[in-house]
Image (cartoon, helix red, strand yellow):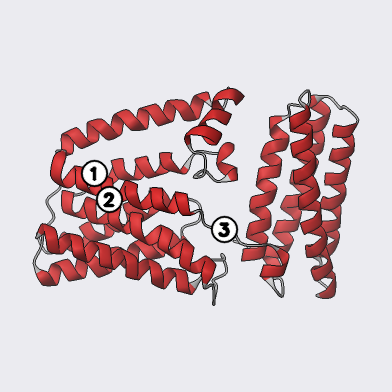
Amino acid sequence: MFPSPLQHLANEFEIVIAEMTRVDAELEEWRRSITERCARLSERLQELQQQLQQARAKGAPLAEALKSALAAYLDEVDGGAKQERLREFQQACQQRYDALVAELDQRRVVADDPAELLAPRVPKLGRAAFHVMMGFACVLLYELVLSRTAGLLVLGSVVTFFGTIEILRRYSKRLNDFWVDTIFRGIARPQERYRINSASFYLWGLTLIVFFAPKAVACAAMLVLALGDPIASAVGFRIGGYRFSNGKSLAGAVAFLAAAATGVAIYFALSGSFGFVLAATLTLVMSAAGMLAELFIERIDDNLAIPVVAAGTGMLVLWPLGQLQLPL
């Protein structure tokens, strides 16, 4: 995985490519949107190119080639090119971008000052609050109200609904805009307009752990996700400090562990599910597993990876002790 500044550039480029793929050239709004996005991306590529030239890195010509491809694409848009022609230029942009990423990833090129090159993704307060509230609500419902069977029925119904929406909004711009701009306004990230919404991954993760894990382990895993992920994002953004090659920060990882462990410890103390030593062990191990999943698993969404890894680790602790009672 390429370093943090390039990852932010990748996120921006993926949004632009998604906008290109949408190809709604008859609408003035689409033309204006794609023009603004390409112009902003070209500016960032210019900054990256200058830093690469100063570092005498071989990626500079590739950045220039991508910039030229974006300019050519915009010329076609302004000239009223048809959809097939625009797709050819979109593919050219994608190829040049892939070549740039491959070169920089191979040489592990990092900008001297990432903050000057690309601003990090700012955590959304509403998204974080929603994340935490959903986690607490799910734990309370499962612990106090719903049986495992009822919980699976509810989750199955919601997952089916969300899955249907995810499919339909690929074919309906109006539904997609309503889903992103109205239902999840203030919560959705820009790239989720053209990707699976993170709420769907959240629901899939909860469904898996409720199906496979004992209730106490499942609830603890929900808290690891609900508390650790948003706290890590907020602390990593505000404090920063040492960062790993994927852009995640050490400060965010420590905050994840502290927040998740605190929540899980309180839950085990109130529920009385395990003795003190076992509860403390599960708290530390599950929180650490969730932290590592958030830190290093890149290809699977955090909302799915964190609860599944945390619950799976907790079950591995219980199994050799003879205290693992599978709900199946």
Q: Quadrant of residue 319?
A: bottom left
Residue 321 bears which disc, if any?
none
Q: Secondary structure at mark 2?
A: helix
Residue 301 visible to an observer of this rendering: no
Residue 122 bears which disc, if any?
3
Marked residue nearer the N-terminal end (2 or 3): 3
> Taking 201 as reference, is 84 left or right?
right
Where in the figure is residue 222, as x and y percent of width and height? 29, 52
How many other residues sit within 10 Å of disc 3, few (<14), some (14-19) or many (≥20)?
A: few
Residue 136 bears which disc, if any?
2
Q: CA distance from mark 1 to mark 3?
A: 32 Å
Residue drawn 23% across and 60% down?
314
Image quarter of the N terminus:
bottom right
Q: CA distance from mark 1 to mark 2?
A: 15 Å
Marked residue nearer the N-terminal end (1 or 3): 3
Residue drawn 59% across and 58% down?
121
Q: CA distance from mark 2 to mark 3?
A: 24 Å
Where in the figure is residue 108, as x and y percent of width and height? 67, 69
How many other residues sit within 10 Å of disc 1, few (<14), some (14-19) or many (≥20)?
A: many
Residue 210 bears which disc, if any?
1
Mark 1 vs 3: CB contact within 8 A: no
